[in-house]
Amino acid sequence: MKHALIAALTIAALAAPLAHGDSVSAHGEAASVYDETRGTLRAHVLRLINRDRALDHLPPVELDVAASALADAYCREQIVNHTTGHFTLDGLAPYMRYSFAGGNDGISENAAAWSATYAFSDRALYELVRRSEDAMMAEMAPHDGHRKTILDPYATHVGIGLAWDNSHQRGEFRLVHEFVRRYVDWTRPLPRRAQLTDAVLLAGKPLRGMRIAGITVHHEPFPHPLDVVTANRLDSYALPASRREYLPRLKTTYSRRDDGTLAVNVQQYANGSRGDFRVGDDGAFSFSVPFADGAGIYTVVVWVQKPGNATSPIAASNISIRVDAATPAGLGQTAAGGRR
């Protein structure tokens, strides 16, 4: 019988039975073998990524352990649900999954899926990792989303998710990259659930010599469950186009005129506004998130930029909040009190 191998790659712009690798992991020695294989595979993926970044004269990314654990869980869920790409059956986009698991930084996701009519040996797993990387890096514009994600000049970390299943005389393999842009020290992270009437404050301070350039707040309806066919057809994702933009408040400066009187200099943006939120002399900022578009998912993107640098700002967060309609007074107090 001829062996068949099918690959699917998907790109950017969480009571069912476990996959074979995880069912094995419950059995002592076999568990340690599986985890050791996954650990060495992860290290191999990281080497390939940083090799390709170095060839493009980009700094290496560090392994993000928390993002890798999240990505592992996502890969296992894909195998259980027979899905590929960026969406499982809950309908959550990657930035929502990352946020609802506690992530605060900016992310971009690559995903690869392989299916075969035979079980994967350890050697085959290493080959699939290599072939996935090579396929992504071989992409040509304008269809080069994987390549651009690997070569993101602003990525600082990466989560690497891996899962495989050799049951039923078949092989299923999933690989996910979660490229992370870590540029803010979050002194007051956002909650992940709120009500329309809540006052929700975000505070932080840019790292790596950056300054805050602006904040955008994106809105979209609550996600709906997906069937397998629909989930597998969604081979890319993006933040919703519906968004509101907010700028740092400009400062009022004072100067002494030649005649000794005091001149007040009121700075304005091109649209005539003075800005929307305050930034301290040390770069620290705070921002009250407006829920101006009704119930739904609000995703807050903090943009940072190196002072004096004319390059495009960097999306340093994709923080999603589920915002529900306000609970009538006197109702639902227990649920509201335990929400965060």
Image (spheres, rainbow, N blue to C red):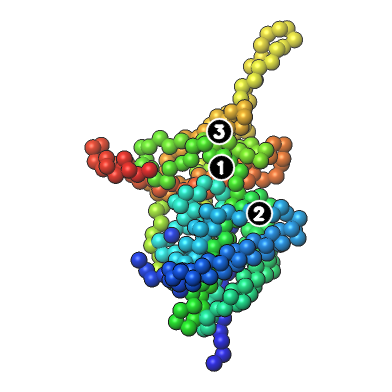
Characterize the local packing of mark 2: few (<14), some (14-19) or many (20 or more) Cα atoms within 10 angstroms.
many
Q: Is residue 171 above or below residue 180?
A: below
Going from N to C along the chain, the mark reached first, 1 or 3, is: 3
Cα distance between the residues tagged 3 and 2: 27 Å
* Residue drawn at x 25%, y 37% as measured from the top left: 329
Which residue is more in the foreground, 102 or 268? 102
Which residue is more in the foreground, 269 or 13? 13
* Residue drawn at x 57%, y 39% as measured from the top left: 185
Q: Is residue 13 above or below residue 322?
A: below
What mark, if any, has residue 285 been given in the picture? 3
The amino acid pointed to by label 1 is Val
Q: Which residue is mark 2?
A: 61
Quadrant containing the N terminus is: bottom right
The amino acid pointed to by label 3 is Phe
Position in image of residue 247 (x %, y %): 57, 35
Residue 340: quadrant of the picture: top left
Going from N to C along the chain, the mark reached first, 3 or 2, is: 2
Going from N to C along the chain, the mark reached first, 1 or 2, is: 2
Cα distance between the residues tagged 1 and 2: 21 Å
Which residue is more in the foreground, 261 or 98? 98
Q: Looking at the image, do the residues carrying marks 1 and 3 touch, with CB atoms under 8 Å apart?
A: no
Q: Which residue is mark 1?
A: 302
- The mark lying in front, picked from 3 and 2, is 2
* Residue drawn at x 46%, y 38% as measured from the top left: 289
